[in-house]
Amino acid sequence: MTPEERAAQAQWAFDAYEAVRARLPGAQFPAASRRAANLTDLADDYDVFLLDAFGVLNIGERAIPGAPEHIAALQRAGKSVMVLSNAASMPKRVLVEKYARLGFDFAPEAIVSSREVMLAALKGQELGRVGMMGLPGYGVEELEGFDITFLGDDPAIYATADSFVLLGSGEWTEARQMLLEDALAIVARPVHVGNPDIVAPREDGLSREPGYYAHALADATGVAPVFYGKPFANAFEMALARLPAPPDPARVVMVGDTLHTDILGGAAAGFATALITGHGALAPIDAGAAIARSGIVPDVILPDP
């Protein structure tokens, strides 16, 4: 993909987030951002570091250069360092293995995924027959107790489901999206979204994530999806619940590469925020222009993690 193509893709993603702004939480922001070189420079300012994964720790299956070293330095300094990710398609076991493979040392409880947030919220709810957007290769690990059928190309599955859960879009197609839209237009049913992201940065560009398809469903059918994960409060509440004591919000920083999920979500939760501009969603475009247009202003801007 050429630099021009990457920039066009990143601008499209920014525009897509702005188009659904009414469905996202509101927040207060600082008047201006300050600059820092990397996360180690923030060690004296914050005690709790909530880190997005894609665009902060890794791009696809590759660790961002310097990220493992800076994270390790924060951990040695006694900081509480947690991954707060919208990676909903993979079970916790797979995430732990992935970060270890990339050179990070995170205990399972230090990783909070939107998948966990959604499962905790749905526990005990009567969902009936669930039509699942996800990756069948992982089976129903962590999803035991739900009556799940993975959504494919059979219209009957869409027609007979009592509710829908959107976890992973790696095998999703436009044809399947149309089947889901048509089914919801005929009979409205609950839609639970385990990954609110519209896009995620990969080695070959931006992938379309469940949030993209959930907003398209809402626009086409009027069904209001229920979102779990950043920028919504449920993700931050679960992360804070893992800490030994409630922190001073001013000493908590959310670090991410997207304005509309990481920075907006962190600010809405009452925390400081730090935007990574050299990697991830905003890297191909002018981050300053995106901040000015959206009004989503981070406390700190970092070129690298």
Image (spheres, rainbow, N blue to C red):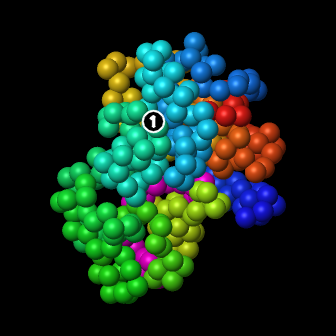
- In this view, which residue lies farthest toward the top? 44
Q: Residue at x 28, y 74 (%)?
A: 149
Can you give x and y, in whole percent of width and height, for residue 55 in the image? 60, 45
11 relative to 271, above or below:
below
> In the picture shown, does residue 82 fall above or below 88?
above
Report the magenta residues as a range. 180-201
Q: Amino acid at mark 1?
A: Phe
Picture quadrant where residue 141 is located: bottom left
What residue is at 51 percent from the left and 43 percent from the top?
Answer: 53
Q: Position of residue 210 (x, y in %)?
A: 49, 62
Residue at image location 33% in from the left, 68% down from the top? 137
Q: Secondary structure at mark 1?
A: loop
Q: Identify which residue is drawn at 38% across, 20% down.
A: 246
In the image, taking residue 124 as reference, residue 177 lies left or right, namely right
**Depicted 91 relative to depicted 174: above or below:** above
Residue 200 seen in render? yes
Q: Nearer the viewer, residue 19 or 97?
A: 97
Q: Nearer the viewer, residue 124 or 53?
A: 53
Instruction: Say few, some or many: other residues with alpha carbon within 10 Å of mark 1 (under 14 / 14 to 19 / 20 or more).
Output: some
Q: Is residue 204 magenta?
A: no
Residue 241 in sight in this render: no
Q: Quadrant of residue 157?
A: bottom left
Quick one: 126 or 135, which is closer to the camera?
135
Tell me, yes or no, whether the highlighted magenta stretch contains residue 198: yes
Residue 172: % across, % down: 48, 73
Farthest-out residue, left: 145
Along the viewing direction, whichever of 90 and 235 lies nearer the viewer: 90
The quarter of the picture where the N terminus appears is bottom right
Residue topped by disc 1: 104
